[in-house]
Amino acid sequence: MADEQETVVETLTSDDPIVAKIARIVGAENVSDTELERIVYSGDPSSLPQFHYRWKYKYLVDYVVRVKSIDQVQAIVKIAGDENIPIIPRGGASSCLGSSSPTRGGISLDTKPMNQVIEINSSEMYVRVEAGVTFNQLERELFKHGVTLGIRPTSARSAVIGGWIGCGGEAGIGTPLHGSLVSNILELKVVKPNGESVNVTGDDIGLFCGSYGILGVICEAKLRVVKYPSGHTTFSYAFDLLEHTCNAMRHLSMLEPQPVYLKIADKQFQSYSNPLEKGNYVLTATYQNEPDPCPTDKIEAIMADNGGEYLGADYSLKDWYLVEDCEFNPKEHCQTLMFQEMLVQVDKLYDLLKSYESYKKSHKTPAIWFAMLGHDGWIRAELMAMLDPEKYLKFIGSKGILHKMVGKSVKLGGGPYTIGLQNSVYMKRAFPNRQEKMIVAKDKWDPGGIMNPDRVTSCLTSYLRMNVLFQLAAGIRRLSKIIDRGE
Ligand SMILES: Cc1cc2nc3c(=O)[nH]c(=O)nc-3n(C[C@H](O)[C@H](O)[C@H](O)COP(=O)(O)OP(=O)(O)OC[C@H]3O[C@@H](n4cnc5c(N)ncnc54)[C@H](O)[C@@H]3O)c2cc1C
């Protein structure tokens, strides 16, 4: 054993004693403090404006650690606790907005190697999985047993179970029909910051759903499964007017049975995946063929009332097949895709989108958008701006407009969808009750404060400071004619 350990230590990338300690647990190949890996593991696909880095005490993690088992997580968390090193749990990093980025250095804990499907029980209709399993990997296994999770985020190709739990899972494919993620979790196995492993059940599951890694490391989940559907019915309609598009979506959201997928998008968003040949907006809805059949007649009547024009079977099917690609496609056509996701009730969606479209005109912001139905009438609306970060004034100005849009969503009774690092500053305004609950939970679960610091319960900057900066930035954006000449 001693010989083995010495061999491991010889292959380390650094002589840091913490790296040596960690390597003895996970193997030298699964710990790194090289600059390249630290950079890769400190970011995510979203663009954090430059000034954001100034707010962080340390914007690079100190160590990257890949864990394969709950025992390894316990041992690593114990070291972190003893040495007072922050732990930043990381899945697919697709949550963006700095959710799994550090603020004070620390250990980026890559949970993706914990990717075992532990048990599929198709008579009691549940599955037990490790946190690092991707949705598509899990679905392939479930399919062999004739069952499915029923819900998944549209980022299913890269997101992992633990990561979606970390983010809350309010909206995804299947959530209108099967409910939000929290209502589909039966039990979690979590490693507390002191290294202890506990089973989480009942109301406490709701604390971990949307905890952004601030309470402990989710290692396993027991999730409900449903019978695999025999097929789907999908249709897409084009609309000329935003109001009619939102109205059609609202009516469909009230119809039974619920769809598995219901989205609307503007023409430009659509042009990057499934271009529209007519109309300015698209609505796509997908229904399972059972237990209740698709309410085709009622849908056609709603579409006709709102001036929707059917786009044909080929177009509709393509839109459904592209569900896991369409949101990232615009990123291939610009330097930076800046975005904010909002949570609003479906009857407030028109107000929100109308406001974003009017900023597009008045502030010349390169805005596009997409919105999908979550559960119980909640919508995840993704407001994007296609930008070149080198054109700094425009870039920061568009960020200012997205800030105003968060304010608008709060006024409409919603708030930002993903909290992560960037949106923690809005928690108190948008979700004060949730924040209060999480402050109490943080004191209980992580009294030492090592788990993913500076988000959800606290923030590195003040709302006042940020509001002044972004209001100013949005104002400057309005002078776009001058900016256009200057840049
Ligand atoms: C193209 C695209 C489409 C998306 N579609 C949807 C959608 O349909 N619905 C939706 O809800 N969201 C969606 N999202 C955002 C969504 O929340 C993430 O895609 C996904 O759920 C995050 O999973 P991840 O594995 O990438 O987690 P990460 O981004 O790695 O982590 C998310 C948060 O959870 C924490 N965390 C990760 N693993 C653990 C763990 N094991 N224990 C404790 N904490 C942990 C992290 O610290 C972080 O704070 C989308 C994002 C993109 C980019």
Image (spheres, grey):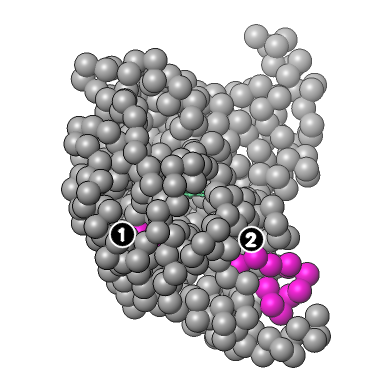
Residue 311 versus residue 413 in the image, above or below:
above
Residue 382 covered by magenta stretch:
yes
Is 248 or 122 nearer to us in this picture?
Answer: 248
Please name the residue that numbered disc 1 is placed on: 303
Q: Quadrant of residue 177?
A: top left
Helix, strand or loop status at disc 1: helix
Query: Where is residue 438 shown, x and y percent of the image?
Result: 33, 57
For image coordinates 70% across by 11% down, the residue present is: 4
Q: Which residue is drawn at 60% across and 42% down?
A: 108
Work out whether residue 131 can be spotted: yes
**Position of 134 compared to 168: left or right?**
right
Q: x%, y% of residue 424?
A: 46, 64
Question: Given the image, on which type of amino acid does mark 2 rest?
Answer: Leu
Q: Is residue 218 above or below residue 271?
A: above
Which residue is at 34% across, 54% downward?
A: 373
Around disc 2, counting alpha carbons within 10 Å, would you say few (fewer than 14), some (14 to 19), or many (20 or more)?
Answer: many
Amino acid identity at mark 1: Met
Residue under numbered circle 2 = 337
Frontmost residue, 53 versus 6: 53
Q: Where residue 278 sits in the image (x, y, percent)?
A: 51, 62
Question: In the structure shown, which secondary structural element does the residue marked by tag 2 occupy?
Answer: strand
Residue at x 75%, y 22% (from the top left corner): 9
Q: Is 275 left or right of 193, judged from the image as shown?
A: right
The stretch in magenta equals 379-395
Q: Alpha-carbon distance for marks 2 and 1?
A: 32 Å
Which corner quadrant of the image does residue 118 belong to? Answer: top left
**From the viewer's perspective, is 198 left or right of 67?**
left
Name the image quarter holding the C terminus. bottom right
**Of callouts 2 and 1, which one flags the residue occurring earlier in the amino acid sequence?**
1
